[in-house]
Amino acid sequence: MAAKAKTENPLLSLMLNVVVPVVVLTALSGEDRLGPAGALLTALAFPVAYGAYDLIRRKNFNLLSIVGVVGVLLTGGIGLLELDPQWIAVKEAGVPLVIGAAVVGSLWTRFPLVRTIMRQVIDFERVTSALEDRDARDAFERRLAYTTYMLGGSFLLSAVLNYVLARLIVVSPAGTAAFNQELGRMTALSLPVIAAPLAILLALAVLFLVSGIRKQTGLDVVDILRDSGRRGGGAETSASRGRGSE
């Protein structure tokens, strides 16, 4: 049996990618502490180190993680090179735009990202078999494409919100303690202002896809989810239960 892939620890990810950098930027940027450059480098070291650690531990290249690390490095470059703070807004909008474009663009590749992501939670072998039995494969592919566009739209919304938030908050010259503190404030606010709406839209996209699968296959939700039929010592699927009652 193949070893089960290690999953990411969401609490550890939140702490090292958001909480610790915010605390460092807002509390340690003063000249009497780490200074602007020292605090910025220290804050950026945590998400970069975590991304490298997660890659080594799980031995899997994650597109979102790679884009996130690149975004962190760009933030560091803007701060250390003391570029105009408007570039922070450009970077903040650019990262979700790149992700959204990759998600939508993958529709024209052999490995659509939405399909790849959904394979983590949906039993595609069972779903595909049920779709073929009902001659509903084309309808499923259309719904999968619609879901992809929904996800792409959610990242577009994230880009707009990121840009507006960055332009409103990060106004001080790069390389100053005030600039670092504004970066920390922007990062802290990004969770309720940006992450919450994005999470809602992502959840709606998943529900849209799952509801379509239910209609097109006749399977229950518990039969659609990955490994659901094998929990609890090999639980029966709704299809097998139906055959057993005939």
Image (cartoon, rainbow, N blue to C red):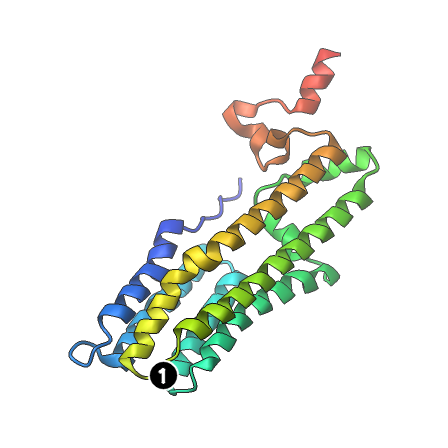
Q: Is 181 on the left or on the right of 65, as rendered?
A: left
In x, y percent, where is residue 112? 68, 57
122 on left or right of 136: left
Residue visible at 57% across and 50% down in the picture? 202
Q: Residue at x 39, y 87 (%)?
A: 81
Q: Is residue 17 visible?
A: no
Looking at the image, which residue is at 48% across and 75% down?
89
Tell me which amino acid carries mark 1.
Ala
Extreme residue in the top direction = 246
User: In which image quadrant can residue 73 be found?
Assistant: bottom left
Identify whether 209 is placed above or below 235: below
Q: Quadrant of residue 30?
A: bottom left
Estimate the x, y position of residue 6 in percent, counting from the top left. Answer: 45, 48
Question: Where is the C terminus found, in terms of image quarters?
Answer: top right
Q: Nearer the viewer, residue 160 or 13?
A: 160
Q: Around disc 1, counting alpha carbons within 10 Å, would you say few (fewer than 14), some (14 to 19), or many (20 or more)?
A: many
> Residue tagged by mark 1?
174
Q: In the rendering, at what x and y percent does residue 196 appear?
A: 47, 52
Query: What's the residue at 32%, 84% (across, down)?
Result: 175
Determine the residue located farthest toward the front in the rendered image: 168
Q: Height in image: 165 above or below 232? A: below
Which type of secondary structure does the marked residue at label 1 adopt?
loop
Q: Is residue 117 above or below residue 219?
A: below
